[in-house]
Image (tube, rainbow, N blue to C red):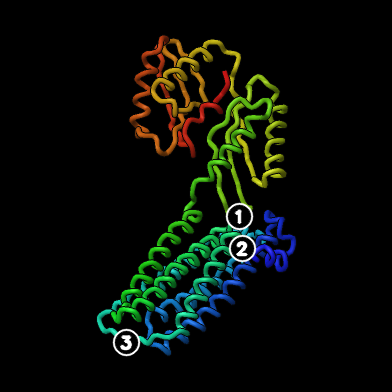
Amino acid sequence: MTRLLIRLFVRDYQNTENTKVRESYGKFSGIVGIVTNLLLFSGKITAGVLFHSISVTADAVNNLSDSASSIVTLVGFKMAAKPADSGHPYGHARIEYISGLMVSLVVFVTGFQFAQTSFQKILHPEQTKFSLFVIAVLVVSVLLKAWQGAFYRQIGKAISSATVSAAAADSMNDVLSTSAVLAGTVITKLTGFNLDGYVGLAVAVMIMFTGFQLVRETSNPLLGEAPDRKLVDDIYHTIDSYDGILGIHDLNVHSYGPGRCFATVHCEVPAERDVLLSHDIIDNIERDFMEKKGIHLVIHMDPVAMDDPRTNELKGQVRQLLEELSPEIGMHDFRVVWGPTHANLVFDVCVSFEFPMKDEELVEAISQKVRDLPGNCYPVITVDHDYVPARQNFDTKI
């Protein structure tokens, strides 16, 4: 059914990389959310008020907050599609992340408010009335919310949207919470023990927990989370496939929203080669990334001397001692400043953020080993951090 609706209401639905198509998906999901949640709210609020059930009423207002969240989603996708301007040269796509965070906060606040209300109901219980109408409303709600969750999940996956994925998680949480209300209503009828306040409190805690999880997940892109491992590997392997590239390091990837990816990287090229030829290779790589991957890539070109036997020998020795210290240590930008009494070995080492040694400890450990090399060597070391460990496959080839 979801596929049929998408085909009917989303033009060119298969072209999910297109910003206008993504906007159409987001608007459609927002409209569906508004309509379905308002229907559920109407049925539940009527049943909750008529039969004095705080748990059903809490579930109804939760659906009303979901409608508000859907409105935020609708507006967010509309604003995120605005083109770049002088005040926002990288576009407005991050508004989608902000709308996702707002949805998450609404979920958490709603849960907190109903935790308070349910606690009061436990302290001052009010007799609820059993009704088949209440049961019917809750059953329909479970079924509709299950469909809504699957609907959001499919759209969120299709357009890689954190906002819609958050709505999917919230919908599936609503399936559990409404099922708990349904079970509590039936148990109260069968046992005579009023579970209304307790079930309402359980639902509220569940809503708060989901809201907290969603706040954490949707705020990560705004804080600047690490890029996807597959994306990093793809960038490294693609650049490494070009002739004339000796090494790759210092990759930085910045996301300004879906479809707005910017990256910078250092590429090592032979110092002996004509600089215009190396520059042409760099230009081709940058252009290919934009055309084929939609990534705005900027490359810093590092010339590396390859025809000095003494430098190459020292480089191999340093690489070997780094391997002995840890296979997760990479190296780049190696050069030697020769002097009459000693040689300064200047290079960067690269480790992941999870590397067990502190930067100062790592520098000291490497320095001790370098000083033991023949030739009176003095190390000058800079520590870089990569997204993933063991980048030695992309270090300078010697």
Residue 95 in view of the camera: no
**296 relative position to 119: left or right:** right
User: Badge 1 is on which residue?
Assistant: 258
Say which element carries label 1.
Answer: loop
- Location of residue 296 (image quadrant): top right
> Who comes first in sequence, dot 3 or dot 2?
2
How far from the left and from the top, in percent, is residue 169?
49, 62
Say which element carries label 2.
Answer: helix
Q: Which mark is residue 80?
A: 2
Label 1 or label 3, whichever lies nearer to me, is: 3
Please state which of residues 161 and 274 is positioned toward the viewer in this rendering.
161
Please state which of residues 318 and 61 is positioned toward the viewer in this rendering.
61
- Location of residue 371 (image quadrant): top left
> Who comes first in sequence, dot 2 or dot 1?
2
Residues under numbered marks 3 and 2 in contact, where contact means CB atoms less than 8 Å apart = no
Query: Where is 320 relative to 91, above or below?
Result: above
Please state which amino acid type lies under the numbered disc 1.
Pro
Query: Where is 287 relative to 341, above or below?
Result: below
Residues under numbered marks 2 and 1 in contact, where contact means CB atoms less than 8 Å apart = yes
Query: Where is 55 relative to 378, above or below?
Result: below
Say which element carries label 3.
Answer: loop
User: Badge 3 is on which residue?
Assistant: 127
Residue at point 60%, 47% (across, down): 262
Residue at point 44%, 21% (across, down): 323
How far from the left and from the top, in percent, is residue 177?
42, 70
How far from the left and from the top, in percent, is residue 89?
62, 56
Please state which amino acid type lies under the numbered disc 2.
Ala
Residues under numbered marks 1 and 3 in contact, where contact means CB atoms less than 8 Å apart = no
How far from the left and from the top, in percent, is residue 280?
72, 32
